[in-house]
């Protein structure tokens, strides 16, 4: 009887060990599987304390530069310290759009600088910075509905001045949409320059406005990224 009892105990133990070995570990989420960049460490200051975050670790994409894959450009936006989470998300969205516009503005400014000689543009009359700033302002209007917010990550901090929310957002925009918005903006700039040529007070200003119109027409026809 003792032998049978001992055998039963051993058999039960073996069954339990087999069952323990068959436990299935939880799979990573789809987002974790798709993440390309490893998590990054969160910097903290003496006067600040992280008290909550929407994910266990800060995602690696929060530190990425604008990138392109499959005709889609990705941008990362970041909010300032905001009093509420919704406000921080709104700020991050605006920051993302500003990043897209600045990116396109840099390309236009480079073309503007290179075109000054071929178009005979004078910096004393047609300031590249002024022209590009006007382009960025108009592009912001034309791009507002093209940038899509895809992934959010938020942190809640205790600071010296109170609670602060900081949100990161990963946004995407098709290159084609950026190109179309840029061409529309360049067309708007060309029409504005033509109107300035009509209203110019002297021949020099009129000539420069016409040349500026020619430049923006070229941007409209060629595209800023070509």
Image: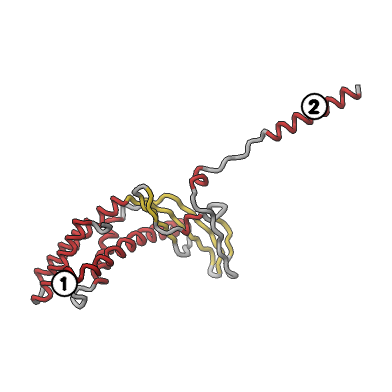
Residue 182 placement (x, y as % from top left): 25, 57
Residue 10 placement (x, y as % from top left): 82, 29
For marks 2 and 1, the one nearer the N-term is 2
The answer to which image quadrant residue 127 occupies is bottom left
Left or right, 194 with respect to 27, comes to left
- x 29%, y 51%: residue: 177
The answer to which image quadrant residue 109 occupies is bottom left
* Secondary structure under the numbered disc 2 in the rendered image: helix
- Above or below residue 205? Residue 24 is above
- Per the rendering, the mark at residue 14 is none
Quadrant occupied by the N terminus: top right
- Per the rendering, the mark at residue 120 is 1
- x 27%, y 64%: residue: 108
Badge 2: residue crowd in 10 Å (few <14, some 14–19, many ≥20): few
- Above or below residue 205? Residue 43 is above
Mark 2 highlights which residue?
A: 11
The answer to which image quadrant residue 179 occupies is bottom left
């Amino acid at each position: 009887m003792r032998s049978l009892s001992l055998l039963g105990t051993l058999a039960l133990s073996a069954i339990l060990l087999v069952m323990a070995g068959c436990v299935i570990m939880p799979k990573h989420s789809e987002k974790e599987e798709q993440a390309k960049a490893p998590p990054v460490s969160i910097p903290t200051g003496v006067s600040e304390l992280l008290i909550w975050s929407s994910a266990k670790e800060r995602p690696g994409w929060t530190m990425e530069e604008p990138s392109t894959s499959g005709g889609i450009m990705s941008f990362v936006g970041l909010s300032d310290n905001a009093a509420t989470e919704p406000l921080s998300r709104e700020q991050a969205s605006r920051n993302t759009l500003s990043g897209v516009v600045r990116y396109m503005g840099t390309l236009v400014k480079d073309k503007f600088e290179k075109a000054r000689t071929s178009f005979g543009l004078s910096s004393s009359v047609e300031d590249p910075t002024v022209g590009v700033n006007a382009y960025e302002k108009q592009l912001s209007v034309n791009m507002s509905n093209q940038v899509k917010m895809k992934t959010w990550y938020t942190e809640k901090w205790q600071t010296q001045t109170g609670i602060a929310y900081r949100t990161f957002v990963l946004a995407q925009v098709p290159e084609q949409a950026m190109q179309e918005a840029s061409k529309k903006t360049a067309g708007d700039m060309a029409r504005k320059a033509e109107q300035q040529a009509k209203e110019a007070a002297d021949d020099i200003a009129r000539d420069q406005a016409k040349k500026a119109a020619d430049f923006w027409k070229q941007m409209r026809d060629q595209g800023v990224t070509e």
